[in-house]
Image (cartoon, grey):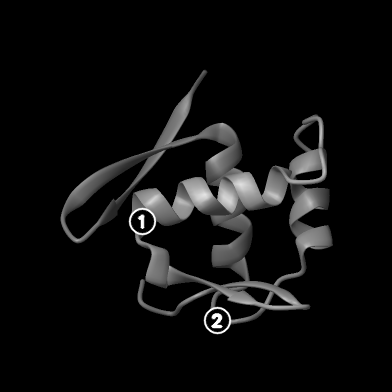
Amino acid sequence: MAEKHLERDGQRVNLTRREWAVFEYLFHWLGKTVSKTKIEDALYNLGSEIESNTVEVYISRLRKKIGGDRILTERGFGYRLVDTW
């Protein structure tokens, strides 16, 4: 499985292909709330199987890797990548 990476606070952070897809999608909409459905669609376009908690799993993994305070949950609306990049 190919990994992508980014740098955060001077540290290399490795992301799986699907983690990268979620991060890239959120980054594209930096500072704006993105619905779970839109993120699911982005993952589905990768040919991924989408289960009911797929987005939550990848958001959780990203939070562990880049910091929990950088992806906010907007209850009832979706997720927002904080503009600190």
How many numbered marks have been drawn onto this rendered protein structure? 2
In this view, the mark in front (2 or 1): 1
Marks 2 and 1, how far apart at CA: 16 Å
Q: Closest to the observer: 58 or 22?
A: 58
Side of 12 where 15 appears, left or right? right
Q: Is residue 7 above or below residue 50?
A: below
User: At which x and y percent is residue 47?
Assistant: 80, 29
Disc marking residue 66? 1
The spot of residue 41 in percent (x, y) is 83, 50
Q: Please tell me whether mark 1 sits on a helix, a strand or a loop.
A: helix
Q: Position of residue 57 (x, y in %)?
A: 61, 45
Relative depth, front residue between 28 and 79:
79
Q: Residue at x 77, y 62 (%)?
A: 36
Residue beneath label 2, please? 31
> In the figure, is residue 21 to the left or right of 65?
right
Res 13 quadrant in image: top left
- The residue shown at (81%, 38%) is 51
Q: Is residue 66 above or below residue 3?
A: below
Q: Residues within 10 Å of mark 1 (few under 14, many from 20)?
A: many
Q: Earlier in the sequence, mark 2 or mark 1?
A: 2
Q: Residues within 10 Å of mark 2 (few under 14, many from 20)?
A: some
- Quadrant the C terminus occupies: bottom left
Q: Residue at x 77, y 69 (%)?
A: 35
> Residue 75 versus residue 41: which sits nearer the camera?
75
